[in-house]
Amino acid sequence: MIRVAINGYGTIGKRVADAVAAQPDMEVVGVSKTRPSSEAFIANERGYPLYIADIANRGKFEAAGIAVAGDVEEMLRKCDIVVDATPGGVGKDNKKLYELYGVKAIWQGGEKHEVAGISFNSSCNYNDAFGADFVRVVSCNTTGLCRIIQLIDEAYDVKSVFATMVRRGSDPGGIKKGPVDAIVLNPVTIPSHHGPDVQTVLPDINIVTTAMIVPTTFMHMHVLQMVLANEANAAEILELIRGHPRIGLVKGSTGITSTAELRELASDMGRPRSDLWESCVFEDSVSVVEGTLYLFQAIHQEADVVVENIDAIRAMMQVTPEAGESIRMTNEALGLKAI
């Protein structure tokens, strides 16, 4: 069994912990929090040993009725690999600690590529992470872009990509940003950071991206244009998408035209936390006009990177050299049957 620690039991960390616990070849040896919270209670309830950054705060946790197993350094002594799910910009400071205890580490897309030197997407560059000590799983938006661009590029040779990210304003559970009543250019300059981030995984792709934030909390929406070198039609593209294990097609016959309806669908499907681990391409949007592919896809910002973390663990621990096999194992353990 691969012994996995999750440093940061928040939006991504708690989902990764549950995904690890579901895998037949992995176990959660600990999760961490910096202060008492509802998530700390849930960690106790799920039976995950809870470690804290500063052991001097142990009394605060115990006064709140939350059991503490020790500090983060003790957690690192018990694991083979740590998934760093601390807030963006914080994780890089933990690298020296991971090196000190000789554990492999995975960071999230909130950190820069340089923290690990390998930016990861299961469908694109699984082999780059095979046996590696440090890996960064790219952000939710980059994950969604990489999946579809790689799929189309392999079949039709993508000459260029233009993508606009319509981004959620905050996560559903977040209140720090308060009420939102604006459309914010994020950034005003072009390109946004998403294109260069895609190139950390797919360096040969010519891509320009723009982004804006809108007043919603569930999912991002992508508007994609891909100029293709080889002739294609919509029917062929749809067939390719149907065969991808991490891209689902939102069928026109469902009547779904919004992220709100997608969330309701995920709930009806019995998905934990209404999570959509797959990218959600709207079937009726897929069209090819004069050699350019157009489509809409929705990306669940809290969920799509979770399965990528699991595959990164397997690659780094050299469980299987085949990306497809790891993806199959992860999907099967989670019950992921694409929409």
Image (spheres, rainbow, N blue to C red):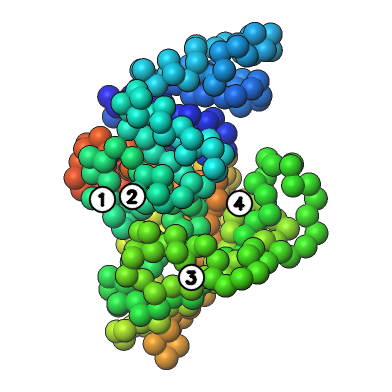
Nearer the N terminus, badge 2 or badge 1?
2
Nearer the N terminus, badge 2 or badge 3?
2
Element at label 4: helix
Residue to which mark 1 is pinned: 128
The residue lying at 68 percent from left, 54 percent from top is 169
Please state which amino acid type lies under the numbered disc 3: Glu
Nearer the N terminus, badge 1 or badge 3?
1
Q: Tell whether 89 sits left or right of 307.
A: right
Please state which amino acid type lies under the numbered disc 2: Ile
The residue lying at 36 percent from left, 17 percent from top is 77
Element at label 3: helix
Q: Are marks 1 and 4 in contact (CB under 8 Å)?
A: no
Residue to which mark 2 is pinned: 118
Question: Is 296 placed above or below 99 here?
Answer: below
Please state which amino acid type lies under the numbered disc 1: Asp
Q: Could you tell me how far apart the alpha carbons at marks 3 and 4 are, in whole angstroms?
A: 17 Å
Residue to which mark 3 is pinned: 283
The residue lying at 31 percent from left, 84 percent from top is 229
The residue lying at 47 percent from left, 39 percent from top is 92
Frontmost residue, 194 versus 126:
194
Frontmost residue, 4 versus 189:
189
Frontmost residue, 57 versus 294:
57
Pointer 3 local density, CA inside 10 Å: few below 14, some 14–19, many at least 20? some
Q: Is residue 259 visible?
A: no
Question: Is 179 placed above or below 173 here?
Answer: below
Q: Could you tell me how far apart the alpha carbons at marks 1 and 3 are, in whole angstroms?
A: 32 Å
In the image, which is nearer the foreground, mark 1 or mark 3? Answer: 1
Q: Tell whether 103 sits left or right of 180.
A: left
Task: Kindly identify which numbered label has been placed on residue 263.
Answer: 4
Element at label 1: helix
